Image (cartoon, rainbow, N blue to C red):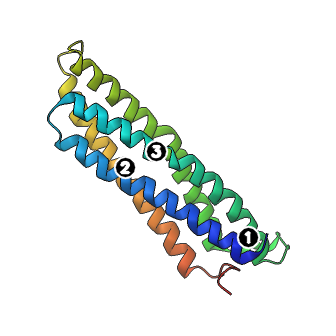
């Protein structure tokens, strides 16, 4: 694949990840502000749709990132091991993916189950307090994911090599 076309798809993948994080964070704030439990559940369902962008974006970013590495070093893949910025970027991206695939869905599922219980009046007595704690955890999750993404962006812009699509 041509370097500039691949780079364009890499940027599109980044845009998908950014959209999923920003949209999720905005809807998360809406869930906290909403007073009616059925409305909170409705906004939560919309939020899940934004979350569906993440696996698509992750696949795009992984595939185009591999091709970018190949294009950057003209097929000599042994050279990229010496680039500290690139190694750091790959490690942070792996952490971003694992964090997003494991912790985010677990927190959201648990909170949704509690919100359904409150809506149906079958939840335990401390459900609302637990939901407040989970809301803080989910907000922290979005903050960590956003910071990781911004560090990855910084490493991409200020790193030692440039993407072949920029040339």
Q: Are marks 2 and 3 in contact (CB under 8 Å)?
A: yes
Residue 89 pos. (x, y %)? 59, 65
Q: Which residue occupies 68% across, 87% down?
A: 167
Q: Is residue 99 left or right of residue 69?
A: left
Q: Is residue 81 visible?
A: no
The image quadrant of residue 28 is top left
41 or 144: which is nearer to us?
A: 41
Up-down relation of residue 159 to residue 133 (above or below): below
Q: Is residue 159 visible?
A: yes
Q: Residues within 10 Å of mark 2 (few under 14, many from 20)?
A: many
In front: mark 3 or mark 1?
Answer: 3
Q: Is residue 66 left or right of residue 103?
A: right
Residue 69 pos. (x, y %)? 73, 70
Q: CA distance from mark 3 to mark 1?
A: 27 Å
Res. 24 mark: 2
Q: Are marks 3 and 1 in contact (CB under 8 Å)?
A: no
The residue positioned farthest toward the bottom in the image shown: 167
Q: Which residue is mark 1?
A: 69
Q: Which residue is mark 3?
A: 51
24 or 69: which is nearer to us?
A: 24
Lower sequence index among marks 2 and 3: 2
Q: Assign a secondary structure to mark 3.
A: helix
Q: Are marks 2 and 1 in contact (CB under 8 Å)?
A: no
């Amino acid at each position: 694949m041509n370097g500039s076309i691949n780079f364009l798809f890499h940027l599109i993948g980044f845009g998908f990840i950014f959209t999923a994080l920003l949209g999720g964070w905005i809807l998360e704030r809406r869930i906290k502000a909403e007073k009616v439990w059925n409305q909170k559940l409705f906004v939560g369902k919309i939020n899940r749709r934004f979350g569906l962008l993440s696996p698509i974006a992750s696949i795009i970013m992984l595939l185009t990132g591999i091709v970018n590495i190949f294009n950057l070093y003209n097929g000599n893949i042994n050279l990229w091991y010496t680039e500290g910025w690139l190694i750091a970027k790959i490690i942070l991206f792996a952490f971003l993916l694992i964090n997003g695939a494991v912790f985010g869905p677990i927190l959201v599922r648990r909170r949704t189950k509690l919100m359904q219980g409150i809506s149906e009046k079958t939840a335990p007595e401390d459900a609302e307090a637990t939901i407040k704690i989970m809301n803080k955890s989910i907000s922290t999750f979005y903050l960590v994911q956003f910071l990781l993404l911004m560090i990855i962006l910084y490493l991409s812009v200020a790193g030692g090599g440039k993407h072949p699509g920029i040339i």
